[in-house]
Amino acid sequence: MNTFQELGLNEDLLQAITDLGFTKPSEVQEKAIPILLNNETDLVALAQTGTGKTAAFGFPMLQKINIDSRTTQGLILSPTRELCLQITNEMKLYGKYCKGLNVVAVYGGSSITDQARDVKKGAQIIVATPGRIKDMISRRLVDISKIEYAVLDEADEMLNMGFYEDITDILSNTPEDKCTWLFSATMPKEVSVIAKKFMENPQEITVGNKNESTSQVSHEYYLVNARDRYNALKRLADANPDIFSVVFCRTKRDTQKVAEQLIEDGYNAGALHGDLSQNQRDLVMNAFRKNQIQMLVATDVAARGIDVDDITHVINYQLPDEIETYTHRSGRTGRAGKTGVSMVIVSKSEVRKIKSIERIINKAFEKKDIPDGMEICEVQLMSLANKIHNTEINHEIDKYLTNIKEMFEDTTKDELIKKFFSVEFTRFYNYYQKSKNLNIAEGSFDRDNDREDGREGRRDFGGKSDSTRYFINVGSKDGFDWMKLKDFLKEQLELGRDDVFKVETKESFSFFNTENELKEKVLAFFTDFKHEGRFVNVEVSENRGGGGGGRRDRKRSGGNRDERKTSSGNRGDRRRSEGGSKPRRSGGDSNSDRSRRSDSGSRPSVARRSRR
Ligand code: AMP
């Protein structure tokens, strides 16, 4: 193992490294720094966040540029504002003894004139998000025509986010003979294309295996019915009282919904997604950094800039569309030498994706069971016992002690302990005592839910079923195929990915299924509902099988517009009284599934966690 001196770094940088407390170079630094210092070369480096990659390109760039000149010589492109700011801060720290160094961050959502002014003062290095710098180039607010070093950081993420055109555009404003250093956590096709297009014989380095997840992270998956996803999430949180986690959802809407539900249910949660203003996002991130939020529910895009090192768990509430994204998610934990757990909640239809992810990360998942109610009660009890054991005595209590002692004169030590712990334990016990087993067996795949390949799983409805089949009077002649109709229904009803299934479109009508519990909501919503000027009618179909198109259905397809019109009236009211997909608070609702109900609603509140 080399030291930083042996890598060839100059005194100014070595001094900063000592101040930062870095004792030895990380793997990516050991591999990249000598190459970049000693050669004018292009480079492709496969390395995750948290491996020290900023310093791997930052030190060589700082050493190679001419700080006496005010010309912009280095450009670092990063996918998000947060990462852009993080890199800028790191570069400033690394270059703190480089007198006259000016590193400027250029990103959207902040004053372009202020940024232009900072650049004009003479920025040797600009760290930028693609959208903003493209804008500034076109307005001639920056000049990158003389840069010598361009870094594409988190290239896979930039491409995922659709920045290909922008990157092409930006690089076309830079000199041909510059060096390009590309850093990426994964190596999808698109990144190889960029490498080929913009680089000449790049040297390649890999930290760990390509696309491999960090070794500090263990991977677990939990198989549940799609409808139990939220309850499973709560149990995972309750079973880990000191959890400090990022919970990933696929859409902004799900992110918001899950966060709101968690807050309503007494968890320290917050949402982070693109529909929030920058100010709101900053507030949430600050609360998260201060550990006031234990569960940060986030979209992939919004979570990209999270620079928090001590995240204990990543929870994949839903798997990402692109399984490569899983590497980024799980890389949020297990940083800076710590261990972490990446949990995936999967429904039957998604379980096959686990195998594909295992191939990508080159690591096996452990299938685990969602803890049952009593396990959670035990964990909470022992966690409390542990906290009490480690609590320092507050002697302010002493003056009340005589009175308290009197009260417990006749209570034995055992009784006292039991009473004391019952205060917390009983709340959890009451909450969880009737909770059902949320786990389902892997082999029991019955295709109730959507299939992975996007086609609807066919289902035998001959026996008892938890789902309702509906007839809807739109079909292919209205421009719907099954996918479009499914999207339309999910969108209109604000349902999740697995909530509408077995969609079958005919020419002028179609069928679809939802779980029984959504029946009221679906029917209420489609009472007096118009789409593109025509009434869309939904009725429960007695045809529960896959065939459809029978006489009865054909007759229905003609429908009776007048009848549909007269069935209006109370749609608004019915929708208002609809519980939607939120878990019902225990007691007082019409849900007959008692066991399910006992898992929903607010959990017993627990003392706020303080981690520091
Ligand atoms: P990065 O992968 O660049 O996001 O770096 C992750 C974290 O590791 C940052 O907080 C860096 O300051 C820190 N870091 C970078 N290099 C080293 C090193 N050689 N030793 C210890 N920490 C480091």
Image: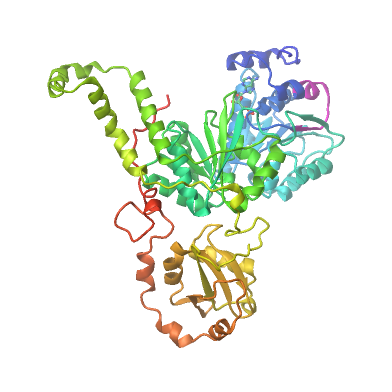
Query: 169 and 111: which one is in front?
Result: 169
Q: Is residue 28 magenta?
A: no
Q: Residue at x 56, y 67 (%)?
A: 461
How far across and down, in percent of the image, does residue 416 sit?
23, 24
Q: Is residue 40 magenta?
A: yes
Horizontally, residue 395 falls left or right of residue 313, namely left
Q: How many marks?
A: 0
The residue positioned farthest toward the right in the image shown = 201
Question: Can residue 156 be seen?
Answer: yes
How far across and down, in percent of the image, does residue 160 sit?
68, 47
> Is 293 above or below relative to 483?
above
> Is 69 above or below relative to 592?
above
Query: 59 and 581: which one is in front?
Result: 581
Q: Tell me which corner region of the image, top left, top right, bottom left or bottom right, holds residue 309.
A: top right
Q: Quadrant of ligand 1?
A: top right
Which quarter of the image is occupied by the N terminus?
top right
> Is 205 above or below relative to 440?
above
How far across and down, in percent of the image, does residue 149 sit?
76, 32
Q: Tell me which corner region of the image, top left, top right, bottom left or bottom right, holds residue 200.
A: top right
> Is 404 above or below relative to 230?
above
Question: Can residue 118 be seen?
Answer: no
Q: Residue at x 59, y 32 (%)?
A: 86
In magenta, the rendered stretch is: 33-45
